[in-house]
Image: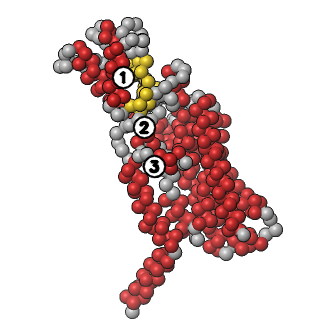
Amino acid sequence: MSLILLKGFFRKELTQALRDKRMRMLIFALPAIQLTIFGFALKTEVRNVRLSVMGRPGDALLEKVARRCYASGYFIPARIGGDWLSALRSGQAEAILAGPVAGLLADRLGKDKAPLQLLLDASNMQRAQQLENYVAQIAAEELAAYSGQPQAPPQKISVRVLYNPALDSAIFMVPAVMCMLLCVITIILTAMALAREKETGTFETIISAPLRNSEVLAGKTLPYVLLGLLDVPIILGVAELMFHVPLRGPLWELLLAAAVFVFATVAIGTVISTIAANQQQAMMASFLFPAILLSGIMFPIENMPEMFKPLAYLNPLKYFVTLLRGIMLKGMGPQSFLFNIACMGALCAGAVGLAALRFRQKLN
């Protein structure tokens, strides 16, 4: 008898879980899509590094080293408009290879302990370590070939690491985790709350209220915007007090970026809630939302295949990660800040507009 009951319960639960087309998509399709993105985009080697080579005009050996770097496939030329420090801070360049201050590189071989200097943006600690190894190997091979002594000890490169000189992994990872937590919390809170209204049957009460659609939407979403913003100082305080992550940029820039991002994620949560039929679907859709994979948190966007890059540039989390790491670790320049905040603001406006449209359709 118990076996018959167990069989009935099993059949009922399985049928209920797979009855809804949206639930089948969440269970089978979205994990496959995420794994595809992860498998294609996750590459351990560093690619498309923005490298600038600075030296005296007419330094043939330095130009040869630069051409070898660019031909390796790891580097692309970085066009910098100002001084090298501003280029590294703004993200125009990730690494700068500088030749000797006095004389040409060929003349300083054997005279200087380190005739070449490499300046690295180490806000991405793992990327910086690989860059140092790549440049050191390429430069050593070229200088040895020029000297005609391939077996001679390799010429050393003076490496100057900026923004994370101790190469502390926490300083690099904590801002990314902060972005991820804020994204997940706000999306889940909003999606679950609105889906609960439909599941418990109180959504009809909201429809019958003497309020405009915009007022209903504001009343249902603004509390979660406030809760998301209240999480910002808590997360920031833990990052600074426990992990000693610096805040080198203005605090108002960080707060403005967080506010725009929270509005965008709450809007995304609202869109998910209008698609999900119940809280279970809203929870799964929030967790499986591929924003984190396409943000640059887990692997650089430069390493992604070309087919996935447009999706990454349509992801507000990508710009928020860039802003948070830049503001906290480097104090990013005004041009870079304005560009990223404008892109995130445009995506936020699009998400809010889509959420308002979907919510109004549900109310009507």
**Amino acid on which disc 3 is placed:** Phe
- Residue nearest the observer in this picture, 87 or 232: 87
Q: Residues within 10 Å of mark 2 (few under 14, many from 20)?
A: few
In the picture, the quarter occupied by the C terminus is bottom right
**Amino acid on which disc 1 is placed:** Ala
- Residue nearest the observer in this picture, 347 or 159: 347
Residue 208 at x, y percent in the picture = 77, 72
Residue 27 at x, y percent in the picture = 45, 67
Query: Which residue matches tag 1?
Result: 66
Q: Residues within 10 Å of mark 1 (few under 14, many from 20)?
A: many
Q: Residue at x 63, y 49 (%)?
A: 348
Q: In the shown orientation, is residue 52 left or right of residue 337?
A: left
What element does badge 3 sit on? Answer: loop
In the rendered image, the residue lying farthest to the bottom is 1
Query: Which residue matches tag 2?
Result: 169
Occupied quadrant, residue 216: bottom right
Query: Which residue matches tag 3?
Result: 308
